[in-house]
Amino acid sequence: MKTKPSFKDIVEAKNRISKFIVDTPIISSSILNDWLGHKIYFKADSFQKIGAFKSRGASNAISWLVEEDNKPKKIVANSSGNHAQAVAWASRQFGIPSTIFMPEYASKIKIQATRSYGAEVELSPTRDETDEKVLDASRDKDVFWLPPFNNKQVIAGQGTATLEALRKLKSVDAVFAPCGGGGLLSGALITARKLCPSAQVIGAEPLNANDAVQSVRLNSIQRLKGIPNTIADGAMTMAVGDITFEFLKKLDEFYEIEEDKIIYWTQWLNHMLKIQIEPTCAMTMEAAFRWLKKQSQKKEILIILSGGNVDDKTRRKIWKQNYLNIMPKDL
């Protein structure tokens, strides 16, 4: 078992990466709060560097390597999107060349953005081939493989999103975050258990890419058998890691979200919050909505909005059918 991150690691990560990242805003919708009868705070990491929370983990992992006098000559990574951009961006901050291995089905705007940050990008037909290529590249002793989630310093960096939010809010009844590989959710769990121990920590995952939920359900890591058919491209991870799995098992609840619900809340949150968000974080709102419907008293909750990088193809899918004629208060 690899070393697991602690709350101390997250605090150190926050101090380490403050000069690189943005302390993103917490926003809300008074209309949504009135309709649902609860107070919902959104931590908007769509305003983060590279447009997603992933820059936190990447910048912390590389900063830590440099701090430990272990600066690599090259960094490689495998990703279907935001982690690719994050590694390319963070590597450039330290003048380290990077090669990112991505599946061909990844968002075109994320592939283009990764290249624009200076990384070399190698595409493969499947995620399995992508993973094999990065493993092969990482065998060079001068190369450091920066994984998207199953790494102590990456998780610690991702945990800084929840740390920033709870330091401002002080207390909430629940914290919600999306799950791809589980890094953001693991960091949220560690932080909430320390700063707000009474709060529940709840995850959301696409029903069509539910390897994490299945893993928790069966108490062993499950791997998807093929490319998942979900609009939530940030949650298309084939399997969680051994580190994140240990945290995911400690969640209070874990929701599997259908595609129409992901699209529904993508439309509504874009409309009500007046910001662009990815379907991956919109699915978290559906988990919160289901949880809030079970509550008999008014609650205050925190939802981590993980990113805002949406390409034209995904945007067309989101708006193919209009869901704004069905108000959340009427569901």
Image (cartoon, rainbow, N blue to C red):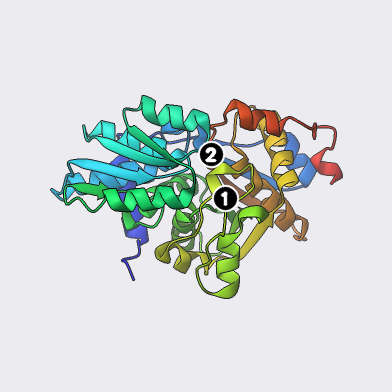
Instruction: Report x, y in % for residue 327.
Output: 83, 38
Q: Give the residue type that dot 1 points to.
A: Ile
- Residue shown at 20%/50% (left/top)? 140
Mark 1 or mark 2: name the one nearer the start of the chain: 2
Residue shown at 40%/31% (left/top)? 114
Say which amino acid is labelled 2.
Tyr
- Using the image, determine if residue 238 lies above or below residue 67: below
Give the image location of residue 75, x and y in percent: 26, 42
Q: Residues within 10 Å of mark 2 (few under 14, many from 20)?
A: some
The answer to whether one can see residue 55 in this image is: no
Is residue 56 found left or right of 261 in the rendered image?
left
Q: Is residue 169 visible?
A: yes
Left or right of 234? Residue 7 is left
Residue 86 in picture, x, y percent from top left: 38, 37
**How many labels, in total?**
2
Task: Please tell me in which quadrant of the rendered image residue 311 appears.
Answer: top right
Tell me which residue sits at (60%, 44%) in the image.
232
**Closest to the observer, 51 or 116:** 116
As measured in the structure, the alpha-carbon distance from the residue carrying label 1 to the one carrying label 2 is 9 Å
Q: Which residue is mark 1?
A: 227
Assess disc 1: are there few (<14), some (14-19) or many (≥20) residues with their C-alpha within 10 Å of its C-alpha.
Answer: some
Residue, disc 2: 105
Task: Kindly check if marks 1 and 2 are in contact, taking CB atoms under 8 A apart as contact.
Answer: yes
Name the spot of residue 205 as percent of width and height, x first: 61, 54
Q: Is residue 301 left or right of residue 327?
A: left
- Residue pictured at 40% horizontal, 51% vertical: 131
